[in-house]
Image (tube, rainbow, N blue to C red):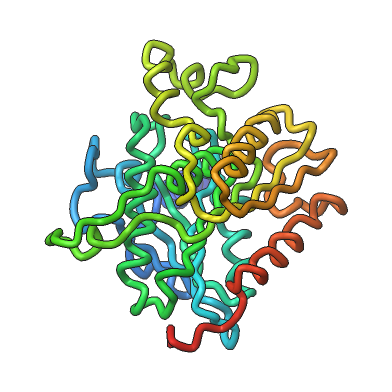
Amino acid sequence: MQQVKMLLVGAFLITAALGMRAAGAQTVSCATPGTDNAFLGIQTIRLWPGTAPEAKGATCDDIPALALLEARPGTANGSAVIIFPGGAYSHLAGDLEGREVADWFTARGFRAFILSYRLTSHGYVLPVPLLDARRAIQTVRARAADYHIDPNRIVVIGFSAGGHLAALAGTQFVAGKPDADDPIERASSRPDFLILGYPWLGAVGTDFSHLNYCKSFNLMDQCEALRAAYSPDLFVTKDTPPTFIYHTFNDQTVPVEQSLRFYEALVKAGVPSEMHIFANGAHGSGLGKGDASLGQWPGLLETWLRAQGLLTVDKSSF
């Protein structure tokens, strides 16, 4: 009997050890940038070959990266989209506002890229996420021939905090340095088109009754400087890319007024823009989340993309 008990205890310990090992494998923070997701048709690349500017360490939290997804077979049209997921600068909504969006675009012939930018929750205060956003756009443009895309058909889409970052990228772009040793730095970081989904454009605004960047990350002593430097509506010019905006009237997390201010700035600057406000819908609706009404906005977006010529095949890219 004693021998049976010892065998049972041994079996339990082995099972527990295996379970702990499996649990440990499941909690690995991230995949190594490379081709480890190749079976899914996804490749991951670092934005910088070595240590990224302003990096605080060498973990996955310190390494901005791009996930690359090819257009569905037989659909490629030469257009590219770079996706900035939201997450309040504290995490990345990589599925709802990343992979689902990428799949939508690749089904329509786009080469899709999902940006994993550095987060303020990990110590990366603006402008570091903007550095990552600019580098992502420069990377796609500089390697346009490798990706079989037109360097003048690069769309940036961002949701919530990613929408704020996308708007910054579209209003505070860099022209590129023609004499830079790094060929990626020679490319412009200006998106050719901008799409904003319920964007958190007043992230560093004066409204502290809703989600606020300064309040969330205890940056109140820096808030005035951050507001002056990173409020997208203050930097809209005639060179801001044509823009499509989607928001809902009763968004309780990010008031629609934030998008309205940005849209007004676009109109004043003469930037061709389109905005759709739905009456009902919570923040974070992604492509609609199955809601019969909100599910209509991707169709409106597709019509807009077609009007920009982005769904027409560019044979020179192949």
Give residue 146's quadrant in the image. Answer: bottom left
Query: As displayed, is residue 79 above or below residue 3?
Result: below
**Viewport quadrant of the N terminus:** top right
User: Between 290 and 154, which is closer to the camera in this rendering?
Assistant: 154
- Where is residue 174 drawn, in percent x and y? 31, 50
Instruction: Residue at 50% x, 50% y: name it.
Output: 84
User: Between 108 and 259, which is closer to the camera in this rendering?
Assistant: 259
Residue furthest to the top in view is 221
Instruction: Answer yes or no: is residue 291 visible.
Output: yes
Query: As displayed, is residue 198 above or below residue 309?
Result: above
- Where is residue 145 drawn, in percent x and y? 35, 79
Instruction: Residue at 60% x, 73% y: name it.
Output: 309
Left of 182 or right of it: where is 33?
Answer: right
Instruction: Answer yes or no: is residue 19 visible.
Output: no
Instruction: Residue at 29% x, 62% y: name it.
Output: 187
Residue furthest to the right in view is 292
- Where is residue 217 drawn, in percent x and y? 45, 21
- Where is residue 308 drawn, in percent x and y? 61, 68
User: Between 262 and 137, which is closer to the camera in this rendering?
Assistant: 262
Left of 93 or right of it: where is 298?
Answer: right
Give residue 171's quadrant in the image. Answer: top left
Query: As displayed, is residue 55 above or below residue 314?
Result: above
